[in-house]
Amino acid sequence: MKVSYFPGCTLKNKAKDLDMYAYKSAEVLGITLEEIENWQCCGGVFTTAKNEIATKLSSVRALKEAYAKEQSLVTVCSACHNVIKQTNYAMQNDKDFSDTVNRYMAEDGGYFGETEVYHYLEMLRDLVGFDKLKEKVVNPLAGKKIAAYYGCLLLRPSGVMKMDDPENPTIMENFIKALGAEPVIYAQRNECCGGYVSVESPELAKKNSNAVVRNAKAQGAEMIITACPLCKYNLVKNGADIPVVYFTELLAEALGVKEDTNE
Amino acid sequence: MQRVGVFVCWCGSNIAGTVDVQAVSEALKSEPGVVFSANYQYMCSQAGQDMIKEAVKEHNLTGIVVCSCSPRMHEATFRKTAAAAGINPYMVEIANIREQCSWVHKDIATGTEKAIILGKAAIAKVNLNTPLTPGESPVTKRALVIGGGIAGIQTALDIADAGFPVDIVETKPTIGGKMAQLDKTFPTLDCAACILTPKMVDVAQNEKIRIFSYSEVSEIKGFVGNFDVTIKKNARYVKEDICTGCGACVEKCPMKKVPNEFNLGMDNRSAIYIPFAQAVPKVATIDPNACNMLKNGKCGLCARVCTAGAIDYTQKDEYINEKYGAIVVATGFNPISMDKFDEFAYNQSKDVITSLEFERLTNAAGPTAGHLERPSDGKSPKTIVFVQCVGSRCDACAEKGKEYCSKICCMYTAKHAMLTRDKYPDTEVYVFYIDVRTPGKNFDEFYRRAVEEYGVKYVKGMVGKVTPEGDKLKVQASDLIANKQLHIDADLVVLAAAIEPDKSARPLATMLTASMDTNDFFTEAHPKLRPVESPTAGVFLSGACQGPKDIPETVSQAGAAASKVIGLLAKDKLTGNPCVAHSNELMCNGCSSCEKVCAYGAITYENKEFRMPDRTTKIRRVAVVNPAVCQGCGACTVACPSGAMDLNGFASNQIMAEVDAICK
Amino acid sequence: MNNQYLREELIRQSGVNPKKCMKCGKCSATCPAYDEMEYHPHQFVSMVESGDIEPLLQSESLYKCLSCFACIERCPRGVEPAKLVEAVRLSAIRKQGENRMTANDVPALLDEDTPQQLLVSAFRKYSK
């Protein structure tokens, strides 16, 4: 199966791991990620104001390209996923917005949110299936207690993301189980790390990140996995004393392709 | 030709303010059949009615048109007036020139023109009216109460007290409902069991009352006065009439790890069980999903220890048919699931509980024998946070929660907080509230005592997140008065979960053809004036199935429902509504279209002999309407392809005459 | 009144109906940036509704909101306070010369692990 793939700014720079492991693992699972040509940065955060149009056009371009190829659009980064899904939702549901956007991009017909957007985790759950993923695991991570860190962007707003229950999610926990490890449930898993406010107020990011790590450890976690480069940055920078890794790295390890990727 | 009298009402200024009533009565004078037309300030007053009676006498009227308010208000009044004047009450027509005219128009000319048109339509119709006589049907003098909580119990006792037999159908193995699970009751703090169990015993001992426990209603047919009900008695694998409730089987049963529903899963019961000591009927029940003998034929211990020989592993579900004159719905409520509210970590920590679980934790007959212990480790909680309005008062579009106020939570939370401080004065107790709603006799005084005498810390604000960490629950909340975010290390968090109607209510409403609101609460016939009757005749509402209610309110409503049932059962015969459908059998071709659309099951078919033009006879299948069941909705008259179905009082030619009069 | 126009503009562009608020305070209870803020999410809702917007425009609170959508997710009335915070912030920074962050600020913010995502997000929130 082929899907369109939106890597995002950080995945081509500071979070190359997140990207490479995603490619390699998808191949093993029978999915080819076809990178959107000339993709542009999603902007990192969705601007909720209804009269913000230009900031959302890069997402629309990516969505339109996937639509033209009759493919679903997959993202790995939590932020890209959030921005692109929210933009797509607005294209579906906010007629003023979609009309304006379509006028901006008038060259080739209208777009009204037809593309299906998947986060890589959703792709694993809905297109591959965790059962099938489990079958493909060659290095089960048995006995490892792993805390899934959702942060804010993966799940919320739940009515738009439609990924999982925003307060009691299971997708990453089931992912961890499929890899043979043991998920750790902790309440701070869906709280914000401090996000971009770390430039404005590093203490706030420190407080939030520490609360996340402390809670995960108190509940027995030996490792935290995330889908978001900014979450990883904030957690690590603020002194996480257990490993914080991208979920794709763990996936590649379990599928036995981590070494290939690093070569 | 009818001799019609027209009476135009001013309704004070309600009608006369935007309708020129004089012009209306003048204009209608010249309509076909009209021999008298007048207007008056209040037609519904005694003087107004007398005016009608005199006009009937003086002008020999055969038909009456009253141009006034909605027929829902005063049609019955004017029909009685007509009857008193010696005219068939169904020769009265109402033209609604208030709700549908004067109230919606601002301009007198428009209002007057429309009132005249509406009057003309009513006159056209009354010219085609025929006298109608309501039929009668007998009344089965027995009532069915569905649900055996405090609502059902009180209703059954009151009906039985008036001398009528009553059956209670309860899905659980015992009656008692939610009240049996409560510890104390607000605002007087009497023990729930102490006031409930005597009533349960009364029910058991009352010769007029039968209890079908562990049973459910599976089919309802018939109509007011004549309901035909099938009750499914689930196999409990214990002969109810032989079991003495000694409990020896419960003691000996080896399957002791079944979550105990009565204690909301906070402790275990055995596979054969009696829900609680004062259960009624006090007989054992075997849980087929947990019993080894029933699952794989291995065990049989309970049968061996039962000296009475009551155990019967071969027992089957039993179906009982019974006739009833009236049905009372008392299906009650449940707290909503907390699954969608995991910001409070209900699924993550055993020490986050609902208020009903708190009741069991403080109840002497509960899993901790009444000692307040944390479910996780049995330690006494030193800091308790109560969260109000969890899932209540949510936006209608929200994906979780209910739009309504659950009404009982403010008071039971005050009770829990007060009792905790009373028994464990070294415990810190916080209550987070949006509003404290305490309308009720001695309710606000009760809440104030919790604050002023017992030192419960009421905080205006909400809890936003609960994080279980180590053996603490880290509560993050807002204090809106202090304009602060609070961080409390709590040992126990208690959620005042919204309440919702029992899940059995919706399918039951379908069986009863009784209406419900969008929240699955049963709808009353009138929110103010007929609060305990369903719009479906013969179906009455008792307790929380109609809306959130506390115990005093439930008991009041239960009594009111009982009095309505008694009023019905005291009658020997019921007068029906004569405005029902009838089939012209010469035109009916027996196609079954009408039967398919009839929501009340009022239409059956019979084979009838008809004489043909050539003097032979032929048997044809034709529709027959049971006038006692027909509600006069008219669906069949529309569905009938041959025009054989018609509705008394609303015949097709009458409706067409009205339309013609309006369009003329 | 000037404020009335601004109030309507904020309501229109945020799509938030502050009248739906029942003043329960759950937004402020759940806000992870609460202690950094002078005006808290529930105050944004009530102050915009009452037209008391000037203090909000001047407040540092605008730059402390994480856009984590916790208040949006957990509001029982579907009020979406974060969208109002964003609308007020845009009103502040859309004025000429009022950008919170400029390209000149970037070098000071960098360390060797700083993800691009951090900078683009901050720019989107703090600059127009």
Image (cartoon, coloured by chain):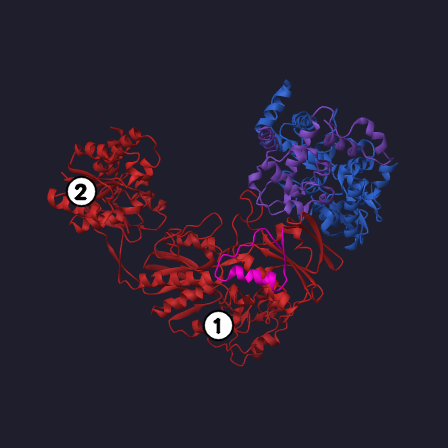
Question: Quick one: label 2, few (<14), some, or many (20+) residues within 10 Å?
Answer: many
Nearer to the camera, B329 or B215: B329
Identify the residue at horizontal 49%, vertical 73% (top origin). B239
Chain for numbered disc 1: B
Identify the residue at horizontal 58%, vertical 47% (top origin). B400
- Of labels 1 and 2, earlier in sequence is 2
Q: Which mark is residue B63?
A: 2
The mark lying in front, picked from 1 and 2, is 2
In the image, what residue type sits under mark 1?
Pro
Q: From the image, state the color of chain B.
A: red
Total numbered circles: 2
- Magenta segment range? B432-460
Task: Identify the chain drawn in blue.
Answer: A
Q: Secondary structure at mark 2?
A: strand
Residue A232 lies left or right of residue B86; in this view the side is: right
Q: CA distance from mark 1 to mark 2?
A: 60 Å
Nearer to the camera, B216 or A82: A82
Query: Could you tell me which quadrant the C terminus of chain B lies in?
Result: top left
Q: From the image, state the color of chain C.
A: purple
Q: Which mark is residue B281?
A: 1
Residue B173 lies left or right of residue B36; in this view the side is: right
